[in-house]
Amino acid sequence: MPRGRWLGLAAAVVLAAATGACSTGEGSTSAQAHFTALAREVAGPMAPPDTARLPLLFVHGALGSGDQFESQAQRFASNGYPADRIAAFDYDASSSTDSSEKVFPQLDKQIQGLLRTTGMKKVDLVGLAEGAGLTERYLASSTGRANRIAHVVSVDGSLAAKPPGGVPMLVVWSTGDPSFRVPGAGNVRFPGLDRIGLLTSPGTFREMFRFLTGTEPFTTDITAEKGQIEISGRVLLYPANAGVDEARLEIYQLDPKTGKRLPKGLGGLFALPADGSWGPFRADGTASYEFAVVRSGEPVHHFYYQPFRRSDRLVRLLTSRPGQEIGGGMQTGPKQTDLVVTRALEWWGDQGRASDILTVDGTNVLSAAVAPRTKLALGVYLFDRGADGVSDVMTPIPSHFGVGFLTGTDLHIPAGDRSVEVAMTPRGQAAHRGVLRVPAWPSDTHRVTLHFRDDG
Protein backbone atom coordinates (compact mmCIF):
# COMPACT_ATOMS: atom_id res chain seq x y z
CA MET A 1 0.00 0.00 0.00
CA PRO A 2 1.37 3.51 -0.80
CA ARG A 3 2.81 5.23 2.26
CA GLY A 4 0.39 8.17 2.10
CA ARG A 5 -2.70 5.91 2.05
CA TRP A 6 -1.27 3.80 4.89
CA LEU A 7 -0.71 6.93 7.02
CA GLY A 8 -4.24 8.13 6.33
CA LEU A 9 -5.72 4.75 7.30
CA ALA A 10 -3.59 4.58 10.44
CA ALA A 11 -4.69 8.06 11.45
CA ALA A 12 -8.33 7.12 10.94
CA VAL A 13 -7.90 4.03 13.12
CA VAL A 14 -6.26 6.04 15.88
CA LEU A 15 -8.97 8.71 15.76
CA ALA A 16 -11.67 6.04 15.86
CA ALA A 17 -10.01 4.57 18.94
CA ALA A 18 -9.98 8.00 20.53
CA THR A 19 -13.72 8.41 19.82
CA GLY A 20 -14.43 5.07 21.40
CA ALA A 21 -12.42 5.97 24.48
CA CYS A 22 -14.38 9.21 24.88
CA SER A 23 -17.67 7.33 25.06
CA THR A 24 -16.66 5.30 28.12
CA GLY A 25 -17.00 8.18 30.57
CA GLU A 26 -14.34 7.88 33.31
CA GLY A 27 -10.84 8.71 32.05
CA SER A 28 -12.14 9.76 28.64
CA THR A 29 -10.40 13.16 28.67
CA SER A 30 -6.92 11.73 29.21
CA ALA A 31 -7.58 8.93 26.74
CA GLN A 32 -8.68 11.40 24.10
CA ALA A 33 -5.54 13.51 24.64
CA HIS A 34 -3.39 10.39 24.42
CA PHE A 35 -4.91 9.18 21.18
CA THR A 36 -4.95 12.66 19.66
CA ALA A 37 -1.22 12.86 20.30
CA LEU A 38 -0.79 9.48 18.62
CA ALA A 39 -2.82 10.67 15.65
CA ARG A 40 -0.58 13.67 15.26
CA GLU A 41 2.50 11.43 15.30
CA VAL A 42 1.08 9.14 12.64
CA ALA A 43 -0.62 11.62 10.34
CA GLY A 44 1.88 14.46 10.71
CA PRO A 45 1.25 18.03 11.91
CA MET A 46 -1.22 20.11 9.95
CA ALA A 47 -1.43 23.37 11.91
CA PRO A 48 -2.99 26.05 9.65
CA PRO A 49 -1.72 29.65 9.64
CA ASP A 50 -3.15 31.63 12.57
CA THR A 51 -3.41 35.35 11.83
CA ALA A 52 -4.33 36.07 15.46
CA ARG A 53 -0.73 35.40 16.57
CA LEU A 54 1.26 38.41 17.77
CA PRO A 55 4.48 39.30 15.97
CA LEU A 56 7.53 37.62 17.51
CA LEU A 57 10.90 39.44 17.54
CA PHE A 58 14.21 37.78 18.49
CA VAL A 59 17.23 39.71 19.87
CA HIS A 60 20.59 37.89 19.68
CA GLY A 61 23.56 38.09 22.04
CA ALA A 62 27.25 39.02 21.73
CA LEU A 63 28.94 37.88 18.50
CA GLY A 64 25.57 36.62 17.29
CA SER A 65 23.04 37.47 14.59
CA GLY A 66 19.40 36.86 13.78
CA ASP A 67 19.93 33.36 12.38
CA GLN A 68 20.47 32.00 15.91
CA PHE A 69 16.65 31.92 16.14
CA GLU A 70 16.27 30.17 12.78
CA SER A 71 15.23 26.70 13.99
CA GLN A 72 12.84 28.04 16.64
CA ALA A 73 11.28 30.36 14.06
CA GLN A 74 10.58 27.33 11.89
CA ARG A 75 9.07 25.49 14.85
CA PHE A 76 6.73 28.43 15.46
CA ALA A 77 5.84 28.44 11.75
CA SER A 78 5.21 24.68 11.92
CA ASN A 79 2.64 25.50 14.62
CA GLY A 80 0.71 28.07 12.60
CA TYR A 81 2.66 31.29 13.11
CA PRO A 82 2.62 33.23 9.82
CA ALA A 83 6.20 33.54 8.59
CA ASP A 84 5.89 37.32 8.19
CA ARG A 85 5.21 37.67 11.92
CA ILE A 86 8.57 36.20 12.98
CA ALA A 87 11.57 38.52 12.75
CA ALA A 88 15.04 39.08 14.20
CA PHE A 89 16.74 42.28 15.31
CA ASP A 90 20.38 42.54 14.18
CA TYR A 91 22.61 45.01 16.00
CA ASP A 92 26.37 45.49 16.43
CA ALA A 93 27.40 42.29 18.23
CA SER A 94 31.10 43.11 18.37
CA SER A 95 30.65 44.66 21.80
CA SER A 96 28.21 43.82 24.57
CA THR A 97 28.52 47.41 25.82
CA ASP A 98 26.93 49.07 22.77
CA SER A 99 25.08 52.13 24.02
CA SER A 100 21.35 52.06 24.64
CA GLU A 101 21.11 55.46 22.96
CA LYS A 102 22.24 53.85 19.70
CA VAL A 103 20.42 50.50 19.87
CA PHE A 104 17.05 51.41 21.40
CA PRO A 105 15.93 53.69 18.52
CA GLN A 106 16.82 50.89 16.08
CA LEU A 107 14.73 48.47 18.13
CA ASP A 108 11.89 51.01 18.26
CA LYS A 109 11.93 51.23 14.47
CA GLN A 110 11.73 47.46 13.94
CA ILE A 111 8.95 47.00 16.50
CA GLN A 112 6.93 49.84 15.00
CA GLY A 113 7.42 48.33 11.54
CA LEU A 114 6.09 44.96 12.72
CA LEU A 115 3.07 46.62 14.31
CA ARG A 116 2.36 48.63 11.16
CA THR A 117 2.64 45.70 8.72
CA THR A 118 0.64 43.25 10.86
CA GLY A 119 -1.97 45.63 12.23
CA MET A 120 -1.29 44.40 15.76
CA LYS A 121 -0.91 46.58 18.85
CA LYS A 122 1.80 44.56 20.62
CA VAL A 123 4.69 42.23 19.89
CA ASP A 124 6.41 39.48 21.85
CA LEU A 125 10.17 39.67 22.50
CA VAL A 126 12.72 36.85 22.94
CA GLY A 127 16.25 37.79 24.01
CA LEU A 128 19.31 35.54 24.22
CA ALA A 129 22.06 36.19 26.79
CA GLU A 130 23.30 39.76 26.17
CA GLY A 131 20.20 40.25 24.03
CA ALA A 132 18.08 39.30 27.04
CA GLY A 133 19.74 42.01 29.08
CA LEU A 134 19.21 44.47 26.23
CA THR A 135 15.48 43.71 26.02
CA GLU A 136 15.09 44.06 29.78
CA ARG A 137 16.78 47.48 29.78
CA TYR A 138 14.62 48.47 26.81
CA LEU A 139 11.38 47.60 28.63
CA ALA A 140 12.49 49.39 31.78
CA SER A 141 13.47 52.54 29.85
CA SER A 142 9.94 53.86 29.29
CA THR A 143 6.28 53.05 29.82
CA GLY A 144 5.59 53.64 26.13
CA ARG A 145 8.05 50.96 25.11
CA ALA A 146 6.78 48.48 27.69
CA ASN A 147 3.19 49.07 26.52
CA ARG A 148 4.09 47.82 23.03
CA ILE A 149 5.31 44.45 24.39
CA ALA A 150 2.87 41.68 25.33
CA HIS A 151 5.41 39.14 26.65
CA VAL A 152 9.17 38.88 27.06
CA VAL A 153 11.27 35.70 27.14
CA SER A 154 14.78 35.86 28.59
CA VAL A 155 17.02 32.96 27.53
CA ASP A 156 20.14 32.42 29.67
CA GLY A 157 20.91 36.01 30.46
CA SER A 158 18.45 37.70 32.79
CA LEU A 159 19.73 40.23 35.30
CA ALA A 160 16.26 41.47 36.27
CA ALA A 161 15.05 41.72 39.86
CA LYS A 162 11.45 41.64 38.58
CA PRO A 163 9.65 41.59 35.21
CA PRO A 164 10.81 44.84 33.56
CA GLY A 165 8.10 47.37 32.83
CA GLY A 166 5.56 45.00 34.36
CA VAL A 167 5.56 42.91 31.16
CA PRO A 168 4.74 39.20 31.69
CA MET A 169 8.05 37.35 31.64
CA LEU A 170 9.46 33.85 31.17
CA VAL A 171 13.07 33.19 32.15
CA VAL A 172 14.83 30.11 30.76
CA TRP A 173 17.96 29.00 32.62
CA SER A 174 20.66 26.52 31.63
CA THR A 175 23.74 25.64 33.68
CA GLY A 176 24.81 27.78 36.60
CA ASP A 177 23.53 28.51 40.07
CA PRO A 178 20.19 26.68 40.49
CA SER A 179 19.05 29.35 42.94
CA PHE A 180 18.93 32.03 40.21
CA ARG A 181 15.39 33.16 39.49
CA VAL A 182 13.43 36.32 38.70
CA PRO A 183 10.66 36.89 41.26
CA GLY A 184 7.29 37.41 39.63
CA ALA A 185 8.34 35.69 36.39
CA GLY A 186 7.99 32.14 35.16
CA ASN A 187 11.32 30.33 35.65
CA VAL A 188 12.24 27.06 33.90
CA ARG A 189 15.57 25.22 33.85
CA PHE A 190 17.41 22.98 31.41
CA PRO A 191 20.67 22.24 33.29
CA GLY A 192 21.98 19.86 30.60
CA LEU A 193 22.07 22.51 27.86
CA ASP A 194 24.55 25.26 27.00
CA ARG A 195 23.40 28.73 25.93
CA ILE A 196 22.79 28.14 22.20
CA GLY A 197 21.61 24.59 22.78
CA LEU A 198 19.17 26.09 25.25
CA LEU A 199 17.81 28.49 22.63
CA THR A 200 17.46 25.90 19.85
CA SER A 201 16.08 22.92 21.80
CA PRO A 202 12.54 21.52 21.32
CA GLY A 203 12.08 21.67 25.10
CA THR A 204 12.75 25.40 25.22
CA PHE A 205 10.43 25.90 22.26
CA ARG A 206 7.63 24.10 24.08
CA GLU A 207 8.03 26.33 27.14
CA MET A 208 8.08 29.49 25.02
CA PHE A 209 5.04 28.44 23.00
CA ARG A 210 3.05 27.64 26.15
CA PHE A 211 3.97 30.97 27.70
CA LEU A 212 3.25 33.08 24.62
CA THR A 213 0.01 31.40 23.53
CA GLY A 214 -1.42 29.68 26.60
CA THR A 215 -1.70 26.42 24.63
CA GLU A 216 0.37 23.35 23.87
CA PRO A 217 2.26 23.30 20.55
CA PHE A 218 0.88 21.01 17.89
CA THR A 219 4.40 19.70 17.29
CA THR A 220 7.94 20.40 18.47
CA ASP A 221 9.36 19.26 15.12
CA ILE A 222 10.27 21.38 12.13
CA THR A 223 7.88 20.03 9.53
CA ALA A 224 8.60 20.00 5.82
CA GLU A 225 6.55 22.43 3.76
CA LYS A 226 4.76 21.18 0.66
CA GLY A 227 5.47 22.76 -2.69
CA GLN A 228 7.81 25.68 -3.27
CA ILE A 229 9.20 27.61 -0.33
CA GLU A 230 10.49 31.18 0.05
CA ILE A 231 13.96 32.07 1.34
CA SER A 232 15.08 35.56 2.35
CA GLY A 233 17.45 37.29 4.73
CA ARG A 234 20.40 39.68 4.90
CA VAL A 235 24.06 39.83 3.92
CA LEU A 236 25.90 41.29 6.91
CA LEU A 237 29.42 42.42 7.78
CA TYR A 238 30.20 40.26 10.82
CA PRO A 239 30.31 40.89 13.76
CA ALA A 240 29.12 44.52 13.43
CA ASN A 241 26.05 43.20 11.56
CA ALA A 242 26.02 46.18 9.21
CA GLY A 243 24.37 45.62 5.85
CA VAL A 244 26.49 44.86 2.79
CA ASP A 245 25.67 47.08 -0.18
CA GLU A 246 27.24 47.73 -3.58
CA ALA A 247 27.26 43.98 -4.09
CA ARG A 248 25.06 41.32 -5.62
CA LEU A 249 23.84 37.97 -4.40
CA GLU A 250 23.74 35.08 -6.87
CA ILE A 251 21.83 31.91 -5.95
CA TYR A 252 22.57 28.65 -7.76
CA GLN A 253 20.99 25.23 -7.57
CA LEU A 254 23.61 22.52 -7.12
CA ASP A 255 24.33 18.92 -7.90
CA PRO A 256 24.33 17.55 -4.30
CA LYS A 257 26.80 14.82 -5.28
CA THR A 258 29.50 17.36 -6.17
CA GLY A 259 28.37 20.73 -4.84
CA LYS A 260 28.92 22.17 -8.30
CA ARG A 261 26.42 24.43 -10.04
CA LEU A 262 23.92 22.77 -12.33
CA PRO A 263 23.83 23.86 -15.98
CA LYS A 264 21.50 26.86 -16.11
CA GLY A 265 21.48 26.66 -12.31
CA LEU A 266 21.29 30.41 -11.65
CA GLY A 267 17.97 30.74 -9.88
CA GLY A 268 18.18 34.11 -8.18
CA LEU A 269 20.01 37.42 -8.63
CA PHE A 270 19.68 40.31 -6.16
CA ALA A 271 21.35 43.71 -6.05
CA LEU A 272 21.88 44.39 -2.35
CA PRO A 273 20.52 47.62 -0.81
CA ALA A 274 22.18 49.45 2.07
CA ASP A 275 20.79 47.12 4.74
CA GLY A 276 21.96 43.99 2.88
CA SER A 277 18.44 42.55 2.64
CA TRP A 278 17.45 40.18 -0.17
CA GLY A 279 14.58 37.95 -1.24
CA PRO A 280 12.23 36.37 -1.28
CA PHE A 281 13.75 33.64 -3.42
CA ARG A 282 11.37 30.87 -4.47
CA ALA A 283 13.10 27.55 -3.90
CA ASP A 284 12.64 23.80 -3.85
CA GLY A 285 12.79 22.69 -0.21
CA THR A 286 14.51 19.43 -1.18
CA ALA A 287 17.23 21.01 -3.33
CA SER A 288 20.76 22.16 -2.49
CA TYR A 289 21.77 25.79 -3.11
CA GLU A 290 24.82 28.02 -3.16
CA PHE A 291 24.58 31.69 -2.17
CA ALA A 292 27.45 33.70 -3.70
CA VAL A 293 28.16 37.26 -2.51
CA VAL A 294 29.99 39.10 -5.30
CA ARG A 295 31.76 42.43 -4.70
CA SER A 296 34.07 44.18 -7.12
CA GLY A 297 37.74 43.69 -6.30
CA GLU A 298 37.10 41.20 -3.48
CA PRO A 299 37.04 37.39 -3.22
CA VAL A 300 33.65 35.82 -3.96
CA HIS A 301 32.10 34.51 -0.74
CA HIS A 302 30.24 31.21 -1.25
CA PHE A 303 27.69 29.96 1.31
CA TYR A 304 26.37 26.38 1.30
CA TYR A 305 23.36 25.07 3.22
CA GLN A 306 21.59 21.78 3.69
CA PRO A 307 18.13 21.71 2.02
CA PHE A 308 15.87 24.18 3.83
CA ARG A 309 12.67 22.03 3.95
CA ARG A 310 10.41 25.04 4.65
CA SER A 311 10.28 28.80 4.17
CA ASP A 312 12.97 30.73 6.03
CA ARG A 313 13.21 34.52 6.48
CA LEU A 314 16.15 34.54 8.89
CA VAL A 315 19.03 33.50 6.64
CA ARG A 316 22.10 35.54 7.58
CA LEU A 317 25.08 35.45 5.21
CA LEU A 318 27.92 36.69 7.44
CA THR A 319 30.93 38.08 5.60
CA SER A 320 33.65 40.72 6.10
CA ARG A 321 35.89 43.10 4.20
CA PRO A 322 39.38 41.82 3.28
CA GLY A 323 41.72 42.45 6.19
CA GLN A 324 38.83 42.85 8.62
CA GLU A 325 38.08 39.17 9.19
CA ILE A 326 37.48 38.11 12.77
CA GLY A 327 40.49 36.39 14.31
CA GLY A 328 42.85 38.29 12.03
CA GLY A 329 41.94 36.39 8.90
CA MET A 330 42.91 33.04 7.44
CA GLN A 331 46.03 32.13 5.50
CA THR A 332 45.13 32.11 1.79
CA GLY A 333 46.69 30.90 -1.44
CA PRO A 334 45.92 29.55 -4.92
CA LYS A 335 46.73 25.95 -3.95
CA GLN A 336 44.59 25.64 -0.83
CA THR A 337 40.91 25.79 0.09
CA ASP A 338 39.82 27.49 3.32
CA LEU A 339 36.54 26.65 5.05
CA VAL A 340 34.38 28.10 7.80
CA VAL A 341 31.87 25.59 9.17
CA THR A 342 29.02 26.90 11.33
CA ARG A 343 26.01 25.61 13.20
CA ALA A 344 23.57 27.22 15.65
CA LEU A 345 24.61 24.70 18.30
CA GLU A 346 27.88 24.40 20.16
CA TRP A 347 30.49 22.02 18.74
CA TRP A 348 31.67 19.40 21.25
CA GLY A 349 34.96 17.54 20.79
CA ASP A 350 35.57 16.29 24.33
CA GLN A 351 32.35 14.50 25.30
CA GLY A 352 33.28 10.94 24.37
CA ARG A 353 30.48 9.17 22.54
CA ALA A 354 28.36 12.33 22.79
CA SER A 355 30.95 14.38 20.89
CA ASP A 356 30.30 15.89 17.49
CA ILE A 357 32.26 14.52 14.56
CA LEU A 358 33.14 16.95 11.78
CA THR A 359 35.18 15.44 8.96
CA VAL A 360 36.74 17.09 5.92
CA ASP A 361 37.59 14.52 3.28
CA GLY A 362 37.54 11.93 6.06
CA THR A 363 39.66 13.82 8.63
CA ASN A 364 37.94 14.66 11.92
CA VAL A 365 38.79 18.25 12.91
CA LEU A 366 37.08 18.32 16.31
CA SER A 367 39.52 17.18 18.98
CA ALA A 368 39.17 17.77 22.71
CA ALA A 369 41.70 20.59 22.45
CA VAL A 370 40.11 22.28 19.43
CA ALA A 371 36.47 22.06 20.55
CA PRO A 372 36.09 21.55 24.30
CA ARG A 373 32.51 21.93 25.45
CA THR A 374 33.46 24.91 27.61
CA LYS A 375 34.58 26.84 24.49
CA LEU A 376 30.96 27.13 23.29
CA ALA A 377 32.27 27.23 19.71
CA LEU A 378 29.71 27.83 16.97
CA GLY A 379 32.13 28.43 14.08
CA VAL A 380 35.13 26.28 13.06
CA TYR A 381 37.83 27.96 10.91
CA LEU A 382 39.87 25.52 8.81
CA PHE A 383 42.94 26.62 6.83
CA ASP A 384 46.59 25.73 6.21
CA ARG A 385 48.40 27.75 8.82
CA GLY A 386 51.73 28.76 7.38
CA ALA A 387 50.73 27.50 3.92
CA ASP A 388 53.21 24.64 4.33
CA GLY A 389 51.00 21.78 3.11
CA VAL A 390 51.09 20.18 6.55
CA SER A 391 48.05 19.69 8.82
CA ASP A 392 47.84 19.65 12.62
CA VAL A 393 44.16 19.16 13.44
CA MET A 394 44.80 18.25 17.07
CA THR A 395 45.93 21.76 17.99
CA PRO A 396 43.78 24.91 17.98
CA ILE A 397 44.93 28.05 16.15
CA PRO A 398 45.36 30.64 18.94
CA SER A 399 44.15 33.64 16.90
CA HIS A 400 40.75 32.01 16.38
CA PHE A 401 40.46 29.91 19.53
CA GLY A 402 40.94 33.13 21.50
CA VAL A 403 37.76 34.67 20.05
CA GLY A 404 34.47 33.96 21.82
CA PHE A 405 32.31 31.22 20.25
CA LEU A 406 34.93 30.43 17.59
CA THR A 407 37.69 27.90 17.14
CA GLY A 408 40.09 26.93 14.38
CA THR A 409 42.66 24.34 13.42
CA ASP A 410 45.41 23.77 10.86
CA LEU A 411 44.13 21.73 7.91
CA HIS A 412 45.59 21.67 4.41
CA ILE A 413 42.78 21.25 1.86
CA PRO A 414 44.15 21.08 -1.69
CA ALA A 415 42.37 23.37 -4.14
CA GLY A 416 41.58 22.24 -7.67
CA ASP A 417 38.97 20.76 -9.98
CA ARG A 418 37.43 18.48 -7.38
CA SER A 419 34.91 18.45 -4.54
CA VAL A 420 35.53 18.62 -0.80
CA GLU A 421 33.26 16.42 1.33
CA VAL A 422 32.34 17.84 4.73
CA ALA A 423 30.31 15.55 7.00
CA MET A 424 28.81 16.28 10.40
CA THR A 425 27.59 13.67 12.91
CA PRO A 426 25.88 15.55 15.77
CA ARG A 427 26.52 14.39 19.33
CA GLY A 428 27.37 10.86 18.18
CA GLN A 429 23.98 10.35 16.49
CA ALA A 430 24.85 8.55 13.27
CA ALA A 431 21.20 8.63 12.13
CA HIS A 432 21.42 12.43 11.88
CA ARG A 433 24.66 12.59 9.90
CA GLY A 434 24.67 15.39 7.32
CA VAL A 435 26.94 15.85 4.32
CA LEU A 436 27.80 18.90 2.21
CA ARG A 437 30.01 18.66 -0.86
CA VAL A 438 31.52 21.86 -2.21
CA PRO A 439 34.02 22.80 -4.93
CA ALA A 440 37.65 23.10 -3.80
CA TRP A 441 37.81 26.84 -4.47
CA PRO A 442 41.27 28.47 -4.28
CA SER A 443 41.29 30.63 -1.16
CA ASP A 444 43.13 33.60 -2.68
CA THR A 445 40.06 34.45 -4.77
CA HIS A 446 37.23 32.60 -3.01
CA ARG A 447 35.88 32.26 0.53
CA VAL A 448 33.68 29.37 1.61
CA THR A 449 31.21 29.04 4.51
CA LEU A 450 29.18 25.89 5.18
CA HIS A 451 26.18 25.91 7.50
CA PHE A 452 24.71 22.76 9.06
CA ARG A 453 21.31 22.55 10.71
CA ASP A 454 21.15 22.35 14.50
CA ASP A 455 17.88 20.43 14.75
CA GLY A 456 19.00 16.92 13.81
Image (spheres, rainbow, N blue to C red):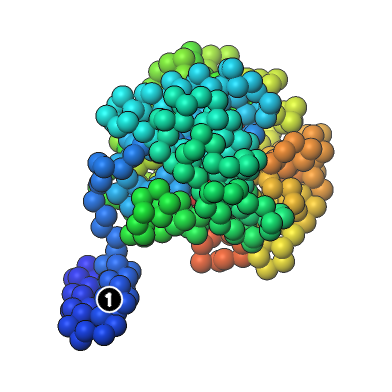
Residue 269 in sight here: no
- Looking at the image, residue 367 sits to the left or right of residue 162; the answer is right
- Looking at the image, residue 404 sits to the left or right of residue 81; the answer is right
- Looking at the image, residue 90 sits to the left or right of residue 403; the answer is left
Which residue is painted at 75% across and 36% down in the image? 403
Residue receiving disc 1: 29
Give the image quarter of residue 96.
top right
Give the image quarter of residue 176.
bottom right
Which residue is painted at 59% across and 17% down in the image? 101
Residue 151 in sight here: yes
Disc 1 is placed on an element classified as helix
Front one among 37 and 358: 37
At label 1, which amino acid type do we have?
Thr
Residue 67 in the image: above or below residue 184: above
Front one among 420 and 314: 314
Which residue is painted at 47% across and 19% down in the image? 275
Which residue is painted at 68% across and 58% down in the image? 178
Query: Percent from the top left, x then y, of residue 339?
Result: 63, 39
Q: Rate crowding at label 1 as few (under 14), some (14 to 19) or many (20 or more) other CA atoms within 10 Å.
A: few
Quadrant holding the N terminus: bottom left
Query: Percent from the top left, x then y, of residue 116?
Result: 31, 24
Residue 234 in the image: above or below residue 164: above
Query: Percent from the top left, x then y, of residue 193?
Result: 62, 57
Query: Percent from the top left, x then y, of residue 91?
Result: 56, 26
Residue 451 in the image: above or below residue 298: below
Give the image quarter of residue 407.
top right
Front one among 78 and 295: 78
